[in-house]
Image (cartoon, helix red, strand yellow):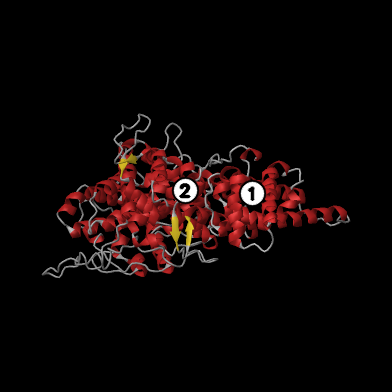
Amino acid sequence: MGSNSSRISDLPKNEYLKKLSGTESISENDPFWNQLFSFSFTAPTSSTELKLLEEATISVCKSLVENNPRTGNLGALTKVFLSRTRELRLSAECQNHIFIWQTHNALFIICCLLKVFICEMSEEELQLQFMYEEKSPGSYSSNSEDLLEELLCSLVQLITDTPLLDITYDISVEAISAMVVFLSCQLFHKEVLRQSISHKYLMQGPCLPYTSKLVKTLLYNFIRQEKPPPPGTHVFPPQSDGGGLLYGLASGVATGLWTVFTLGGASSKTTASPELTSPLANQSLLLLLVLVNLTDAPDTPNPYRQAVTSFKNTQDSSPFPPSAPHAFQINFNSLYTALCEQQSDQATLLLYTLLHQNSNVRTYVLARTDVENLVLPILEILYHVEERNSHHVYMALIILLILTEDDGFNRSIHEVILKNITWYSERVLTEISLGSLLILVVIRTIQYNMTRTRDKYLHTNCLAALANMSAQFRSLHQYAAQRIISLFSLLSKKHNKVLEQATQSLRGPLSSSDVPLPDYAQDLSVIEEVIRMMLEIINSCLTNSLHHNPNLVYALLYKRDLFEQFRTHPSFQDIMQNIDLVISFFSSRLLQAGAELSVERVLEIIKQGVVALPKDRLKKFPELKFRYVEEEQPEEFFIPYVWSLVYNSAVGLYWNPQDIQLFAMDSD
């Protein structure tokens, strides 16, 4: 590296890197460090170039690993960087471009080395690498200083205390990326890490007091979505001697090797996601999710999870409870706006985390009068289920389930009228309530699941959300009412088909082959469970809000033959009583009105009949109410999920897929 511009392919031959990783010890006061940190080269723009950077870094690292026990150069490099970070805030205030540029480059080099070291060695071996000093071969510092911990704490302080300006944007992104790299040891273990040196550093000691400040900073970075400074914003002015340090940050290091957008391996999309317009917001959110999902220490709960689950609105003047040691305040209106505008996997996961674990956020969201701004993006995620990975769909669906646990939400969504939903392509919806649209999208998700993925978990959560809403169905759009009955029709046909297959298998000759027969009894049990739940949803609506839903009664009457086979079925007899009563009552009134009735006339008869139907004739059933309960050991799901997001979404971070142990690289 050094004062001449470099190409990635030149890195293994670079004289400054060769000296850093060589056999000569370099003093912390040596002018070499200023020369090493004065580099600029074109940032990688493809996965091929990122891989080249990785390979170039590995060759330097191997030499450093071999020679560092004798030279202590890694420790010297770290100490030089640490001394610079102490002056960083003042340098930002004084607009010292060159100092900040060189400090960024120092951190970039450390981050490159760290990433390879963490992949190649244990945490204990890594810790030892930072303890070697310039002494006899293999000797290390015997004092109490832990340079690795000091480096991590310095990164935390850099993130929280450095003012965000054009000249500090890139080093802020770099510091966040370096913290992600610090915690990336999880990628190289198949099992979830429950004890780790990096975890201990963050949850105890000098890093702990910064917990709430770090979480708050990362959240505000996500909220503000600050874009990187445009090229040419802070180009260094020319100097008379034409020295080699005259590099515009924007033309070289400003875009930064860590601020390129990774094309990133398995499961990544070929198009850039909207959140990548702000590398700082993207990296901040990923780091926040990693921190929140760290496992608890044996004697200490995860302080970052505590902070995320206990922060409250800036307008809330009530005192913090003693049980929330890391609580803080943040502007909920700004947070809500950011959550409404972002649709990435990681933003959806953050929304899920806040709704599920932070009661202050959940209460605030449910009290909003513009809840459609939050719900519509979630519905759009579910609507485009074919284009989303399964985890993203699950998170969106569980968010809806959590929201539908609240009766106020279930009532209010039917009062919000939407115009021209352009992304809904099955039918032109010029005007529809948010509640009816939600029903349409959830039913579409169920039907997609029935024909494609056949995931019982997804089925269950979709039906649970519909069940939670059913007692508050109001003024259902005629298309929503039709789709409810159409779904029941699809389930009925599937039930008949499975029943016929089961009957034929019993009548047919016993198979002499080793191929096991399908378990039709289990299939039948599952489909009957789903049918019963659909009947309960319809029954709940008829029992609690019949007079508000003439379109559902109309759809029931139009397809009344569907329900005939279930009247005497032992699994459905009880729940069919009310449905059968409503069908019989209104069929009789339509028969009395004569033949050849228009749709308008039928609806008029239904509205009149609702008033005349004695409510005491409808049997009361227990209220349908389902609550989301997180499974035992949720970290077994969330930690691999978060790191898959890091792998695919982190800005400019590349890991060789062959090295990854935590999750299957060909999965969603």
Q: Which residue is mark 1?
A: 534
- Could you tell me residue 454's position as x and y percent? 64, 55
- Could you tell me residue 268's position as x and y percent? 48, 62
Q: Is residue 108 above or below residue 196?
A: below
Q: CA distance from mark 1 to mark 2?
A: 43 Å
**In front here: 640 or 523?**
523
Q: Residue furthest front?
A: 593
Asked whether the viewer can see residue 406, the reply is no
| Residue at left offset 38%, top offset 47% | 368
Disc 2 secondary structure class:
helix
Mark 2 Cα-neighbour bin, 10 Å: few <14, some 14–19, many ≥20: many
Give the quarter of the image for residue 479. Answer: bottom right
- Could you tell me residue 411's position as x and y percent? 48, 46
Specify the amino acid type for callout 1.
Met
Q: Which residue is mark 2?
A: 186
**In front here: 436 or 311?**
436
Disc 1 secondary structure class:
helix
Asked whether the viewer can see residue 30, the reply is yes
